[in-house]
Amino acid sequence: MRAHLGDQLVIESPATGATRRDGEIVGLHHDDGTPPYDVRWSDTDEVTLVFPGPDAHIRHLEHEQAGTAYGSPQPDADAAQAMPAAAPPGTLNPGDIGRRVAAERQRRGLSRETTALRARMSPGYLAYLEEQPADPSVATLVRLADALGTTVGALRGGGADLPPGQGHALLHPRLVDLDPQECRTLLSTHGVGRIAVSTSDGRPAVVPVNYEVVGDAIVFRTAPDSVPAAAVGKEVAFEVDHVDEAMSRGWSVLAVGTASVVTEPDAVRALAQRAHTTPWAGGRREMWVSIRPATLTGRRIMPADR
């Protein structure tokens, strides 16, 4: 019996062949993948050291199909018996979840060790998830989403065209106000926020922009003839939020202040050099707009203490 990190250990009833228990292998003790294994059981979410008996077999992931397991040209007998069928059309492409996990971890400046500690898994298993085709359990995805401050749906890549917040509300929610320091922390250094402006014809508009936080100012790039450019010289509102679909939680931060154009050449050059990304909308957007918040408020939805 040999296994990879992320494979599933299945224990069946000797009499009926029905699955009695299964779990995800999250730790190996031998380089060749032989027992024992650290297994996170799907029914309890606990990790235990397991020496599989004759009623157990390994359900291998798709990396066994390539015939590269531990340098062997062919999968072993257990793999041949438990090989998953080809994924039907329209299902998640192998490796997509790992790429999203790695991208979100790197975007937040987290090491694998820190992320694995937060998600209660081994760094080796996290490395496997990021680098190999994998199908982690829902419990694993929930822990990863919580550790990365994102959602299970975002890691799976589903619901990209749907508005957030379609899940059920918490049974006992609590809405709390955030202090200015926590608001600054949530704004972080960059991301996507929404600016509320009055356009030249007097109509209200709310548009998303890629923003940076530089000192006490919120800055973004736009084009002189764009809707966000209408903010210049006016008091505007700038909002950032996050919704955790898996946990039915969320927060929002609202900054209100006067917007101005950054014209000093050295300041413009410095902003361009330190920008984390170019505007997603593309095109020539070389006009930097700065908002210095006069007020900074926020709220968070979380479970009530019971």
Image (cartoon, helix red, strand yellow):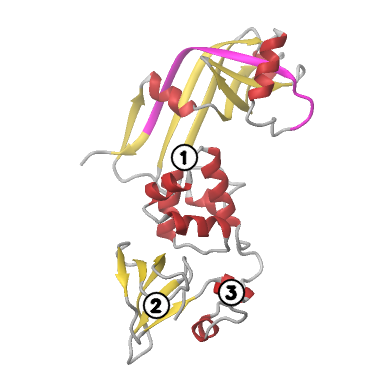
User: Which residue is disc 3 drawn over?
Assistant: 71
Image location (x, y in percent) of residue 262? 67, 11
- First of labels 3, 1 by sequence position: 3
What residue sits right under mark 1 in the picture? 243
Q: Amino acid at mark 2?
A: Val
Most common SS among magenta residues: strand
Mark 1 to mark 2 CA distance (whole Å):
35 Å
x 60%, y 47%: residue: 160
Against 178, residue 78 (above or below) is below
Q: Amino acid at mark 1?
A: Val
Inspect the magenta stretch and tell me whether residue 15 lies in it: no
Whole-number angstrom distance, CA of label 3 to CA of label 2? 24 Å
Give the image location of residue 296, x and y in percent.
45, 17
215 or 247, which lies in front? 215
Dot 2 alpha-carbon crowd within 10 angstroms: few under 14, some 14 to 19, many 20 or more: some
Q: Amino acid at mark 3?
A: Gly
- Left or right of residue 185, residue 203 in this image: right
Region in magenta: 282-300
Query: What residue sits right under mark 2 in the picture?
Result: 10
Residue 220, compared with residue 72, is above or below; it is above
Farthest left residue in view = 306
Q: Please indicate whether residue 295 sits to the left or right of residue 190 in the image.
A: left
SS at mark 3 in the image: helix
**Left or right of residue 10, residue 225 in this image:** right
